[in-house]
Image: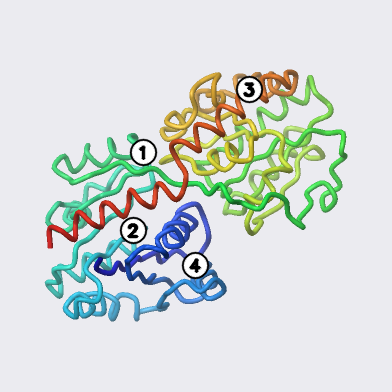
Amino acid sequence: MVGVIHINLAKGWRGGERQVVLLMENLMNETIDQILICSKNSALHNFCKNNHLPYKSFKGLGLFLFVPFLISLWSLQNKYKIVHCHESKGHTLAFMARFVFRSSIKTIIHRRVLFPLKQKKFTLLKYSPKYADTIICISQAVENVVKKTIPDSNTIVIPSGVPFDLVKGSNFNLREIYDIPFDKKIVGYIAALSFEKDHYTFLDSAKLILRQFKNVHFVIIGEGVLYSDILNYSVQLGIREHITFTGFIDNANLIIDQIDILLFTSKSEGLGSTILDFFVHKRPVVSARNGGAEELIIEDETGFLCDIGDSSCFSSRVMELLRDEDKVKEITHNAFLYAQKNYAAEAIAQRVLTVYNRLEVSL
């Protein structure tokens, strides 16, 4: 098996970066040489250093001046024959290797977001079959978006994976650190504080729930540009004392078992790997119909779905779960089995490996 260059230049740590790590870890035992190109001092850089994953890190102009040449050189040396781009900047570097240096390296684009492709000549060229041999879409919804702009693109749907060997529990105790009473249920939301995540609807729903349930506390985990606006909105609604803002928590998936319900109000998701994490931890999910969530949640079987921005529906569904413990056990059991069957990280990595093997044959 020829080698694979992974590229992810994100500075922070979100779902896409976690998926890169899961993929590389699950391919370690395969006959494949792989390396990650990442940004110096990024979250991925630090993770690779601490967990012995093969990488090379760059910063500044070195990324765009040297990396495309390096990709081409490695390809000529037959060291790596596939470059797997996990975000847009990395995609640009791989494109430059082929466009500028005329490299023959095979290129895989991993598309995780539901945003439409830009109708610009450069973007259309990057995504064209001439320069993108395969586009992995994490959901049917994402594939539909890609096909709408690039009808002849070579796409395949492979969802995000979720590990089932997580160590539950953490030294980070939400109730103790934030003084949340033990007799209160915790309704949580793990997401960057950005516009598309729609924390405003989360807070609107919280206010409606608090009118009928006093033994509930709401926790927002994440950081982002809208922090001050969202915090101020909770004050305007008169529910600030019932909301805890934790900021970013490293390995937040390890404290999911401390959260009773996920209220996922995001407006746009390629899939929604946070939902899968809650499935694995057997915690119930109420989500917006945001594109990706509909491919994970079977209404009233593995969770509940509401229209985007429908705080009345969100609050009603959360209150149903607060009232009915038997319903919670039923849907969390169903969701766990559904995730285990369809989204186990090991199986997802094998599906990606199949794409690598197919491209190798075409070399």
Q: Residue at x 58, y 48 (%)?
A: 193
Q: Residue at x 82, y 49 (%)?
A: 178
**Residue type indicated by callout 4:** Leu
Earlier in the chain: of badge 3 and badge 1, it is: 1
Earlier in the chain: of badge 2 and badge 4, it is: 4
Earlier in the chain: of badge 2 and badge 1, it is: 2
| Residue carrying label 1 | 139
Say whether marks 2 and 1 touch (CB < 8 Å). no
Task: Tell me the element at label 3.
Answer: helix
Earlier in the chain: of badge 2 and badge 3, it is: 2
Label 2 crowding class (10 Å Cα cut-off): few <14, some 14-19, many 20+? some
**Residue type indicated by callout 2:** Ser
| Residue carrying label 3 | 330
CA separation in Å, label 2 and label 1: 18 Å
CA separation in Å, label 2 and label 3: 40 Å
| Residue carrying label 4 | 44
Give coordinates of residue 263: x percent, y percent: 62, 33
Label 1 crowding class (10 Å Cα cut-off): few <14, some 14-19, many 20+? many
Earlier in the chain: of badge 4 and badge 1, it is: 4
Say whether marks 3 and 1 touch (CB < 8 Å). no
| Residue carrying label 2 | 88
318 displayed left or right of 59: right
Hey, which quadrant is residue 2 in on the image?
bottom left
Hey, which quadrant is residue 23 in on the image?
bottom left
59 displayed left or right of 177: left
CA separation in Å, label 4 and label 3: 37 Å
Of circles 2 and 4, the one toward us is: 4
**Residue type indicated by callout 1:** Ser
Give coordinates of residue 30: x percent, y percent: 36, 63
Q: Residue at x 42, y 77 (%)?
A: 57
